[in-house]
Amino acid sequence: MLRKICRGVCLIALVLGAPFMTSAATGQSPMRWLAHDMQRPRPPVVTPGKLALPALAPSDAVIVFDGTDLSNWRDAEGGQARWRVRDGYMESVPDSGYIFSAGKFGDVQLHVEWATPVPASGRGQGRGNSGIFLMGLFEVQVLDSFENETYTDGQAGAIYGQHPPLVNACLPPGEWQSYDIVFRRPHFHEDGSIARPARITVLHNGILVQDNVTIWGPTTWLQHRAYERQADKLPVSLQDHGNPVRYRNIWLRELPESAEPSGLAEQPATTVTLSPEQLQKFAGAYSTPLGDAFKVELKDKRLRVHLKTGQVIDLIPRSATEFAMRHTAGKIEFAVKDTGEVTGFTMHLGGEKYPITRLAAQP
């Protein structure tokens, strides 16, 4: 990450299409720890289970790199990427610069396999350093963190400068490793202010290292940078940090836009009003042929059914004999004789019908 002082500024500004250093960049970081604090507790080391790599892409995946060429990648000026391709992987070439996917993406599930140089060379941030930038702005750090000390918010699996990984799941130099990333893009109000910040989940070698954490702003170095209005979709970027880090088998799945939860769904407003006297005739004890007990009661001028599981569900009248089950795509149809006697009901739920018989009233 050290090279970002001379390279990251201009590249991220290029993606944004606006000057990098703005007044928003002077905002205070929301983190409790200062960035890159060597006193910040180290994540525990966990040895990953052996994964079957390369991982096969699902049928709906967009293949971003298949190991044959860099036709899906561009340099910072939009020209052909200048990394090296051989033996099914691509390798960063010193001073070749960041590379950017030709496609632009927002919400994605991203799979990337990577390997750091062998033999290991350097230490700290100078050992096997690269990075994966979602939307070209938000970095998941790539680093040789196998028995290599550095600040925790800059080790492998970190959201650089913000969130250390939950554990250190790094494999030895030269071994192929995987990131599986679920990324949700930021959303903005009409005036350009942030409405919903980006969020990210990362599995490193099959181990959860970032659990749906909030990203505080675009990745930068030695300062916190606030959000600024950006496009809904931008390229994925890979960092050249001067180390020959290898990448292969990069694919992603575009995800539907996430929506804020709006609470439990309600049934449409009923157009039928039944009097307490009309409702009372349905109250009573019921049973299935296997002896499972149900109870229907009238309470606060509304019918309620007590299911065998112990749940109690309000019934909303749709007609004189048909009732919807609140919050549920199901209904209950009462069987009523010409004399007005209720003999039972049929529960319609999940495409199935469950006949339930009314029990005789106790003397």
Image (cartoon, rainbow, N blue to C red):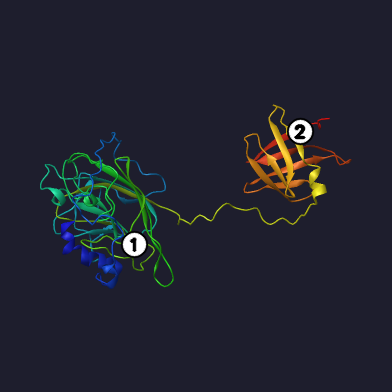
Q: Which one is in front, 285 or 59?
A: 285
* Relative horizontal placement of residue 63, taking residue 256 as reference (left or right): left
Q: Can you tell which quarter of the image residue 138 is in?
A: bottom left
Asked if residue 333 can be seen in this view, the reply is yes
* Relative horizontal placement of residue 271, taking residue 124 as reference (left or right): right
Circle on res. 234: 1
Q: Which one is in front, 189 or 307?
A: 307
Q: Earlier in the sequence, mark 2 or mark 1?
A: 1
Asked if residue 78 can be seen in this view, the reply is no
**Residue 127 screen position, x and y as percent:** 14, 48
Image quadrant for the C terminus? Answer: top right
Mark 1, other Cα within 10 Å: few <14 / some 14–19 / many ≥20: many
Residue at screen point 26% across, 46% down: 248
Amino acid carrying label 2: it is Thr
Q: Can you tell which quarter of the image residue 218 is in?
A: bottom left
Q: Can you tell which quarter of the image residue 351 is in?
A: top right
Residue at screen point 30% across, 44% down: 166
- Dot 1 falls on a residue whose secondary structure is loop
Residue beneath disc 2: 357
Total numbered badges shown on the rendered structure: 2
* Relative horizontal placement of residue 356, taking residue 121 as reference (left or right): right
Instruction: State the CA–CA distance, disc 2 to disc 1.
Output: 60 Å
Which residue lies most toward the right here? Answer: 339
**Residue 204 screen position, x and y as percent:** 29, 43
- Dot 2 falls on a residue whose secondary structure is strand
Amino acid carrying label 1: it is Leu
**Residue 147 screen position, x and y as percent:** 16, 40
On screen, 20 above or below 349? Answer: below
Q: Which one is in front, 22 or 249?
A: 22
On screen, 190 above or below 255? Answer: below
Point out the frontmost of discs 2 and 1: 2
Which residue lies most toward the top here? Answer: 290
